[in-house]
Image: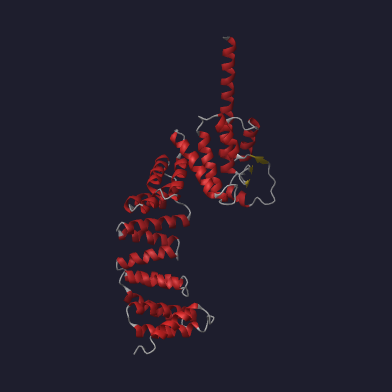
Amino acid sequence: MKKLFTLLFLVSLLSTYGQAILKKADKLVEQKKYASAYALLEKKDPDNKKPAIVLKKADIAMDYFVTSIMHQTFAFKDLEEGEDLMEARLNDEGQTYALYVLPIQDVLDTLIMQHPENYKLHKTLGKFYYEVYLKYGENWMMTSDELLKKMYDHSIIAAENGEADFLTYYNIGFYLTGMERYIEAISAYKNSVQLDSTYPTSQYNLAICYLYVDSAQQGTGYAEKAVELYKSPALKADAARVTGVLYKTSGDFNNAHKFLELSNQIQPENYYTLAQLLEVQLTLELNNDAANSAAVFFELDPANPAIVGELMGIYSQQNADTLLFPILNQKIEEHKDDFEVLGTVYFLLARYYIAQNDIAAAKTLLIASRKNFEKVLEDDTPVFKVIDDFLAKYPDTLEK
């Protein structure tokens, strides 16, 4: 009886000591003493035998490394007051750090075999494969598809056994979105949002999935929340654009206009934002605003037929071609010495008149297009054959 009591006392003492080590490591992490935290854990469990210690080591390695070699070897730094980890990573050239070998996938696989009911191991392994996917993509020891499948498999096991956090459910949703299993992804993202409503990318991806399943109105609230939560201007602008598209798709053009304008203010001259904003402005008959947006859109790349063609397509879809012609005439005048721009605009205007069956106007424009293109393009450029074939088809038709 005395021996049993002694054994139980020692087990309890070791457990208490282990918890104290973990708390001390957490405290060091709070103080941004990442090298000290990892060294403490490494000293406690150098052979990676203790699941709780290994999980803490893995989290520190993934979240706070200053240098990583294929996410198999890691270095850490104790940051000074006011020093930023991302800056330390960018400025690590020429620095000397202690390196720690931690092949997380192998270590956790071994522990999973030894402790099959410790589902925290699966949760961390799922996180690891996601981190590797983000950092290395196809440049790791597995393909990106293999990484994502392993991420999903381990995350699902963790979730089904009550060990999922918001990132676990996010990873599940991320994989399902890539597989176009949007309804299942929505469920996973909702779980992620429920566990942490402050993580913007779960909100954003949830909104996107609602767009994919033709339930745009249900996604607007999540998209708006993502706009609120994102700090990066680029991400905030993207979320605002998605919010605008969701409102536009659900028929609420006023809110669509509000968020597309916000996106345009944060990140001006974005092709995708301007195209959506222009369409909404025309729908709301904000013709002066639309003219301004069209002018900016044109200037994104005025010699690019895709840009000018898209602009004409937006106006045509809104039955507003006559509103575009003065804008194009102004641009022709502004670019009167840019022969490639002139050739492009005349060529696309000719296509419009061909669609209207006004062959004479189309032929006049194609002749003007060819004359301008001749000054800047090689003779074997395919556009010349297109023009010449059309002109040959209608040899006697000219605009009066």
**Does 89 appear above or below 26?**
below
Q: Residue at x 52, y 30 (%)?
A: 116
Which image quarter is the N terminus in?
Answer: top right
Visible in this render: residue 359?
Answer: yes
Tally the marks.
Answer: 0
Position of residue 11 measured from the top left corner of the image (x, y, whole percent): 58, 20
Q: Residue at x 56, y 17 (%)?
A: 8
Visible in this render: residue 25?
Answer: no
Q: Residue at x 58, y 10 (%)?
A: 2
**Does 351 appear above or below 212?**
below
Kindly give the residue lying farthest to the top in the view shown: 1
Residue 45 figure quarter: top right
* Front position in the image: 80 or 183: 183
Position of residue 185 measured from the top left corner of the image (x, y, whole percent): 41, 46
* Front position in the image: 111 or 53: 111
Residue 262 figure quarter: bottom left
Give the colouring mode of the picture. Answer: secondary structure
365 lies left or right of 26: left
Position of residue 293 measured from the top left corner of the image (x, y, whole percent): 39, 69
**Does 81 appear above or below 332?**
above
Which image quarter is the C terminus in?
Answer: bottom left
* Front position in the image: 93 or 104: 104
Residue 308 figure quarter: bottom left
Position of residue 257 measured from the top left corner of the image (x, y, whole percent): 34, 61
